[in-house]
């Protein structure tokens, strides 16, 4: 059975998105350092390191709702929108 995950009532469902999905064998989740109200980067994500931290903290919160940790992650996909991050 599929379980949609939204810990802490993140605002994603209001925008037609869901931050996480758990199935019998897998958990899929994502994190963004994006303020969905303004569609701007969150203020605390002022560097690539801080943006990564914000996104990983969001992912960690989603994983914890189903008893997983960042240590259970086997694959990540990261999208960089700014060429200065290379």
Image: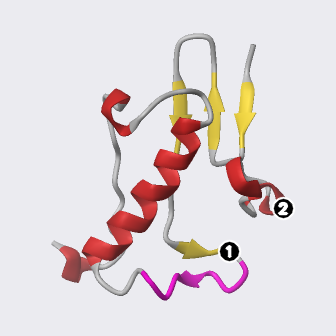
Q: Is residue 70 above or below residue 42?
A: above
Query: Can you give x and y, in whole percent of width and height, for residue 23 in the image?
Result: 63, 18
Mostly what secondary structure, the magenta segment?
A: loop
Instruction: Please tell me whether residue 43 belongs to the stretch shown in magenta.
Output: yes
Quarter of the image where one finds residue 38: bottom right
Residue at the image point whose x is 79% and y is 62% from the top:
15
Left or right position of 2 against 57: right
Q: SS for tag 1?
A: loop
Q: Which residues are magenta?
A: 37-44
Q: Is residue 29 above or below residue 2?
A: below
Quarter of the image where one finds residue 57: bottom left
Please say whether residue 41 is visible from this viewpoint: yes
Residue at which label 1 appears: 36
Q: Nearer the viewer, residue 26 or 9?
A: 9
Q: Is residue 48 above or below residue 46?
A: above
Nearer the N terminus, badge 2 or badge 1? Answer: 2
Query: Can you give x and y, in whole percent of width and height, for residue 27 in the image?
Result: 54, 27
Residue at the image point whose x is 75% and y is 13% from the top:
1
Instruction: Please tell me whether residue 52 belongs to the stretch shown in magenta.
Output: no
CA distance for labels 2 and 1: 10 Å
Residue at which label 2 appears: 14
Query: Can you give x and y, in whole percent of width and height, for residue 36 in the image?
Result: 68, 74
């Amino acid at each position: 059975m599929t379980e949609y995950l939204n810990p802490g009532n993140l605002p994603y469902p209001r925008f037609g998105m869901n931050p996480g999905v758990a199935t019998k064998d897998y958990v899929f989740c994502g994190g963004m350092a994006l303020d969905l109200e303004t569609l701007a980067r969150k203020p605390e994500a002022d560097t690539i390191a801080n943006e990564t931290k914000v996104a990983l903290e969001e992912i960690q919160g989603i994983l914890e709702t189903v008893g997983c940790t960042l240590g259970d992650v086997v694959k990540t996909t990261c999208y960089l929108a700014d060429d200065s991050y290379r």
